[in-house]
Image (cartoon, grey):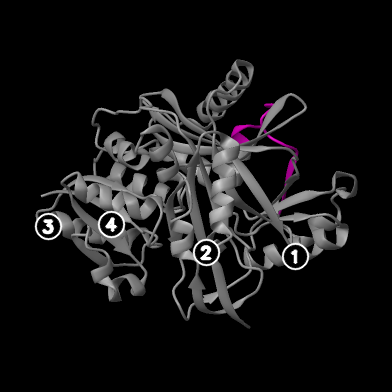
């Protein structure tokens, strides 16, 4: 039984599509999870051959479960994760068990924002930053003239514990709060204004393939940067492509990735690209569908093929204008119902509509990317046309919430 072991999954998005793709490719699909809700709702994951409840934050517990699978005659061909921070754990386990794996140390550097910044030290790709280990140290920092600033937990993912501060009072309050949650250190760094681009890549035997370039639409809510729109780019100016391509290649090489996938978020300022963050996986949410509908490339499938040492098929088949728009909620409380889904789905140009929460669930104002509750995917004859169609359809969806 050729088997792919996955560590953790969301119930939707790229990580879930990876499970479904694995099964479609003919592999036994084993999921290691710490979520009792997934175990209790096992029937909602028909693509999973075997689901194991395990403390996935305990490396030795994971190693034990994998040994048990081997004893049960599962032929393990890959151990992988599509969710931070388990990308590194999965690669480390694959390396330990002698299974093909991605660049383990590079993944570790990408997951840790402190290590990532250190990789780029002295290059034009990193903004000004400083690492704060204690609140007293923060008091002695001369940051007033550098405001506004971003404050980050080095291990954050999905924009969680990443906040923009505009005043010294906000700076002190948020550094103190993050140090109480993560007592080792926080990163403060220059806030970069300007358009933000996401670049999805595959690295195969040291060769870097840029799969897709996506412009991001950012919504600021109480200092939290939430991506609410994705616009797949085509026919970019040659100079733009060359400068962005050089930055992407330099940044990935500086992190030492020789085999694997990663996505970068970058902004352009004063004729230089600045790395906002880099993550060793495909983006979550609708990203795989954006690329699949826009370019004809299934990046989740190609990631699995890379892990399995199978031949890749990453040549675009076409170039369609695709836009995704996400819905957040401006109040916190119990979700009573969602209306407008069918109206949105039947709107012109709409490819897909996804609603995340279920009735009775508690939903909240956005403080991270996980607090986006629906999205609409649309295509059009131009970027603007796809954008208008996606926004128009999203406006039909309403979250009815009993305020907390």
Q: Position of residue 221 (x, y in %)?
A: 71, 60
Task: Give the labeled residue for mark 2.
Answer: 373
Residues at marks 3 and 2, CA–CA distance in whole angstroms: 41 Å
Residues at marks 4 and 2, CA–CA distance in whole angstroms: 35 Å
Q: Is residue 122 magenta?
A: yes
Quadrant where the C terminus is found in the figure: bottom right
Q: How many marks?
A: 4
Mark toward the viewer: 1 or 4: 1
Tell whether 218 sits left or right of 83: right
Q: Position of residue 253 (x, y in %)?
A: 51, 26
Task: Give the labeled residue for mark 1.
Answer: 176
Can you see residue 203?
yes
Closer to the chain start, of discs 4 and 2, is 4
- Residue at image x 55%, y 61%? 372
Task: Give the labeled residue for mark 3.
Answer: 71
- Position of residue 49 relative to residue 88, above or below, is below
**Mark 1 surroundings: few (<14), some (14-19) or many (≥20) residues within 10 A:** some
- Residue at image x 36%, y 68%? 34
Mark toward the viewer: 3 or 2: 2
Question: What's drawn in magenta, residue-wise?
Answer: 118-132
Task: Give the labeled residue for mark 4.
Answer: 63
């Amino acid at each position: 039984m050729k088997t792919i072991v996955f560590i953790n999954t969301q119930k939707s998005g790229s990580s879930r599509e990876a499970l479904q793709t694995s099964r479609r490719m003919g592999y036994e699909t084993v999921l290691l999870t710490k979520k009792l809700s997934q175990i209790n709702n096992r029937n909602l994951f028909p693509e999973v051959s075997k689901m194991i409840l395990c403390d996935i934050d305990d490396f030795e517990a994971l190693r034990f479960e994998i040994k048990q699978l081997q004893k049960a005659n599962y032929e393990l061909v890959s151990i992988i994760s599509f969710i931070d921070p388990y990308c590194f754990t999965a690669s480390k386990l694959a390396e330990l068990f002698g299974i093909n794996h991605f660049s383990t140390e590079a993944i570790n550097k990408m997951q840790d924002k402190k290590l990532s910044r250190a990789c780029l030290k002295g290059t034009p790709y990193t903004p000004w930053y400083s690492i704060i280990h204690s609140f007293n140290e923060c008091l002695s920092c001369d940051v007033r003239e550098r405001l506004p600033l971003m404050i980050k937990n080095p291990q954050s993912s999905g924009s969680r514990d990443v906040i923009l501060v505009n005043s010294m009072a906000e700076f002190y309050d948020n550094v103190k709060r993050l140090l109480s949650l993560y007592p080792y250190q926080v990163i403060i760094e220059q806030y970069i204004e300007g358009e933000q681009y996401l670049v999805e890549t595959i690295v195969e035997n040291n060769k870097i393939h840029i799969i897709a370039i996506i412009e991001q639409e950012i919504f600021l809510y109480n200092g939290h940067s939430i991506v609410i729109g994705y616009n797949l780019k085509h026919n970019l100016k040659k100079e733009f492509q060359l400068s962005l391509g050089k930055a992407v290649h330099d940044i990935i090489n500086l992190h030492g990735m020789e085999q694997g996938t990663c996505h970068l978020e970058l902004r352009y300022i004063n004729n230089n690209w600045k790395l906002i963050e880099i993550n060793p996986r495909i983006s979550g949410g609708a990203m795989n569908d954006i690329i699949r509908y826009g370019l004809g490339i299934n990046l989740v499938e190609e990631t699995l093929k890379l892990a399995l040492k199978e031949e890749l098929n990453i040549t675009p088949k076409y170039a369609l204008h695709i836009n995704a728009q996400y819905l957040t909620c401006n109040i916190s409380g119990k979700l009573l119902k969602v209306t407008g889904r069918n109206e949105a789905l039947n709107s012109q140009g709409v490819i897909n509509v996804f609603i995340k929460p279920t009735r009775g669930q508690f939903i909240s104002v956005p403080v991270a990317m996980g607090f986006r509750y629906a999205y609409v995917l649309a295509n059009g004859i131009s970027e603007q046309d796809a954008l208008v169609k996606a926004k128009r359809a999203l406006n039909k969806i309403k979250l009815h919430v009993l305020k907390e």
